[in-house]
Amino acid sequence: MIFINRQWVLAGLLSIGAITPAIAELTVIYDSGQTRSLTPLLSPLMSESEQMNDSDQSAQQNQASKPFLGPANISNLLPIRSPGLFPGDIGGSQPNAQIIARLAQGNPRPFFLVGSDQVSLQWLATNRETLESLGAVGLLVEAETEADVERVANAAQGLPITLGSGTDVAAALGVDRYPVLITREGLRQ
């Protein structure tokens, strides 16, 4: 008759897991240059030897990956389209009270939706100082070419703007027009 000690089986399985190398390696798909290691946050959970090995390993990976990193290529992000959003006047419409209440709770920083059309470019030029004083960030929701993106960046004069579809944000807010500024108080054009 064979007796199996459960503690030994568990210890054996755990030790196999500890010495088995990872099957898949992580691939960096974007590095802003401001990436920070998670090691300080994980240190309470790791032993001292794991902390030392992890920091050495991450330093080696960062050195090895640096030659391959570079700025994102904007052309890979184009065209940007936001179905259901159109340039034009919001006509004084505001989201319902429930949406405004959510904005007041979860919208610490004002943001704006803008396109590369003439209406948006004029709006950016007219409202740039206000947007800057509010600390607003933008989402470019319509652009076909790199030249479109460049025109918006020039009109923004340093305002932070990212590129992406605004369809989901607009639907959540009940908005179908841009340019528009979204704050805790509601919508402004």
Image (spheres, helix red, strand yellow):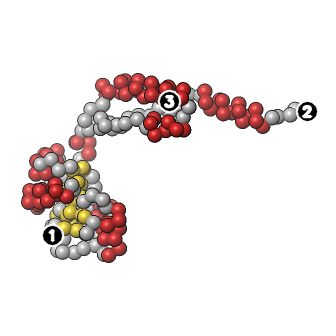
Local packing at callout 1 (Cα closer than 10 Å; few below 14, some 14-19, many 20+) is: some
Note whether 186 is above or below 120 in the view shown.
Answer: below
| Residue lying furthest right | 1
Q: Is residue 130 visible?
A: yes
- Residue 136's spot in the image, x, y percent? 21, 56
Element type where label 3 sits in the image: helix
Residue type highlighted by circle 3: Gln
Residue under label 3 = 51
Element type where label 1 sits in the image: loop
Residue under label 2 = 1
Note whether 183 is above or below 47 in the view shown.
Answer: below
Horizontally, is 39 left or right of 46 in the view?
Answer: left
Local packing at callout 2 (Cα closer than 10 Å; few below 14, some 14-19, many 20+) is: few
Note whether 16 is above or below 128 in the view shown.
Answer: above
Residue under label 1 = 89
Name which of mark 2 and mark 1 comes first in the sequence: 2
- Residue 27's spot in the image, x, y percent? 41, 34
Mark nearest the camera among 1 and 3 is 3
Residue type highlighted by circle 1: Asp
Which image quarter holds the C terminus? bottom left
Q: Nearer the viewer, residue 108 or 9?
A: 108
Q: Nearer the viewer, residue 129 or 76?
A: 129
Q: Which residue is pictured at 19% across the width and 67% down the height? A: 188
